[in-house]
Amino acid sequence: MGLTRTSLTAEIGRGANYTDKHDCVVALAGNPNVGKSTVFNALTGMHQHTGNWSGKTVGTAFGRYTYDERTYSVVDLPGTYSLLTHSKEEDAAKDFLVNETPHLTVVVSDAACLERNLNLVLQILEVTPKVLLCVNLIDEAKKRHIKIDIGKLKKHLGIPVIAITARSKKDIERLKEEITRATDNPSESAYTVQYDDEIEKAITTLREGGVGTRFEALRLLDGTPEAGGDSVPSGAADAVAALQIARTAAELSDEIAKALVKTAEFIAKEVVFVEKATDMRREKIDRVLTGRIFAYPVMLLLLLLIFWITIVGANYPSSFLSNLFSSFEMPICRFLQRLGVPQFFTEMLVFGMYRVLYWVVSVMLPPMAIFFPLFTLLEDVGYLPRIAYNLDRCFHKCSTCGKQALTMCMGFGCNAAGVVGCRIIDSPRERLIAILTNNFVPCNGRFPLLIAMTSMFFISADTAASSFWGAAFLAAIIIFSVMITLFVSSLLSKTLLRGVPSSFTLELPPYRRPQILSVLVRSLLDRTIFVLGRAVAVAAPAGIVIWLLANINVGDASLFAHLTDLLNPLGKIMGMDGVILLAFILGFPANETVIPIMMMGYMAEGTIKGYESLSALKTLLEANGWTWVTALTVVLFSLMHWPCSTTLWTIKKESGSLKWTAVAFLLPTVIGAITCILVNFVFGFTL
């Protein structure tokens, strides 16, 4: 019985030495954010290891503990809301439960959100009847005046149930005792969810046609076998085809989800008792933040506020850092000269590599240091899940997932971070759509260009309210980028990535006081420094390349000038010129360098320059033929062109595919070029 060392090693890459054939194997399952990791840590202490599931890039943890002279091996399954979809995490959890048959599965749930958690419990009972339900965070539930009748819950599910607070050592000892009792005398629950007659008939037909269990039949009826590893046995293929002619996969998926939710809701009503007065304040706030009337205006106002704070707050530290770093240029030059470095290499390192590096740092760091903490603050307070809830309908109409709203918001700080954040989307198809479209929202590296164009050509910089109107115009640009994201997501879901939107469970957490220290650590260290580090890594060699192009002459002109002449015809068609296009191309490693590269081209200098003021920059641009149409096409192309090298590298790592990385490069570029050509054609003749 249980797992042998060999069978477990087949599932977990580095788990060969953690278990023994005499151990009792306990699987730990549960939704994200229910305290499962706390339970796992409390059970196993320091006897823990990590590894990857065989054939999957899904990390897991496993460990051991001894109780009553017996050793237990605990496998911490990936946190998931469901087993019915086909994400890597859910496939890994399902495969372990089905193929490895642990002695016991402990499902950890949140006492304050039991109804939502019961959805997963009911699915696991379809896979394995040897289940212990651990209702965690009972102390949090008491604070919110939520009471759970554990006795009734046991009767409804037919399995052992224990209520604990994982932080309490006493409760962990009770849990160990209950695990021992359950493994010695497992009570196999025969509880099953009853679906409508048509689905029940289909389940029976599928099982007669070769499908092993009710759960496997449900997985096939849920409608996305192309996204996962499930396949339809030949004897059952006709039954699936006939049923899906009568009802689409999306309809079947919705019916299955509704049946699970209905059953969980019925059980929760029987066992959970809430003093409603305690939730009145939250309900009133949610009526505003998620209601039909105020939801979108509030989102827009918050967007305006965050951008206004970011724009105003980033100006002074950016200027300070730029002046600080530039003051080191001559001392570094003198130091290299003392070392005997030739003049050519000294200028290449200082005016090429170093100057691009400090431009990237001084332009990227302040906005990220402001934007990411504000973004994380909204996350910590509990507002970001409500944004996903509000936008779910829009993304659902595009056959994508509402969670894409969260990854899109992360892209405003950094597209690379937004791409990494797409891991929260369960469906591989929808995750890929979110990855491919994340670049359509501007990251903070593109904000300097957008802000400069806005200030010079579209608002009066002399008015006292210029900051507000600048933020308003920028918000309009952002809204346009969101609309483009939705349009392209819909286009992909109807062409290259056809499919139906998956159903998902979205928790609306209670509003909490933000933990300021935690917010600062997560936003500054985990996000800002991480993203800045990647940008610096690619900006250093880019600075050298840019300097060489501007300082190596072929004939009477530099390589930079030859390239601008080559690109000029295409640039004119798009409403720009060769200098602008080359600046975007050379800005591939870091979007922050686009403006200074443009200045270098227009001033015919061999080194990147900063600009003293927007008025001076506007004079320079107008002297080189710029109009408001030029500025508009630059803004549009900044929104819709290839991802920066950091983001493209991240897309390759996350998708694992050169094909989709190439699509991520070409898709926004082609759309941006066509848009600029159309705008220039419509407005260019009016000048």
Image (cartoon, rainbow, N blue to C red):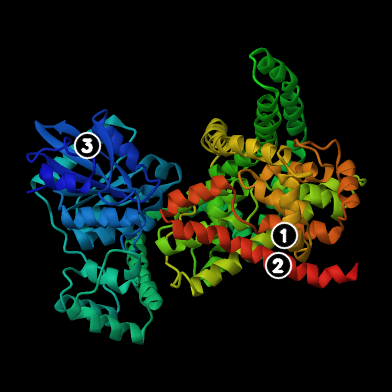
Structural distance between the alpha carbons of marks 3 and 1: 61 Å
Q: Is residue 138 left or right of residue 176?
A: right
Q: Is residue 315 left or right of residue 39?
A: right
Q: Secondary structure at mark 2?
A: helix
Q: Quadrant of residue 251?
A: bottom left
* Mark drawn on residue 675: 2
Instruction: Indicate the position of residue 664 as horizontal and vertical percent values.
Output: 53, 59
Instruction: Indicate the position of residue 28 as horizontal and vertical percent values.
Output: 26, 46
Q: Quadrant of residue 143?
A: top left
Q: Which residue is at a point 59% across and 36% down the rendered structure image?
A: 541
Q: Is residue 363 above or below residue 329?
A: below
Structural distance between the alpha carbons of marks 1 and 2: 8 Å
> Label 2 near label 3: C-beta < 8 Å?
no
Query: Toward the viewer: 550 or 587?
Result: 550
* Mark drawn on residue 636: 1
Q: Quadrant of residue 675?
A: bottom right
Q: Which residue is at a point 24% across and 52% down the rendered structure image?
A: 151
Q: Is residue 168 above or below residue 337?
A: below
The type of residue carrying mark 2 is: Thr
> Label 2 near label 1: C-beta < 8 Å?
yes
> Label 1 near label 3: C-beta < 8 Å?
no
Tell which circle, 3 or 2, labels the residue nearer the N-terminal end: 3
Q: Within 10 angstroms of label 3, few (less than 14), some, or many (20 or more) residues? A: some
Q: Is residue 672 left or right of residue 648?
A: right
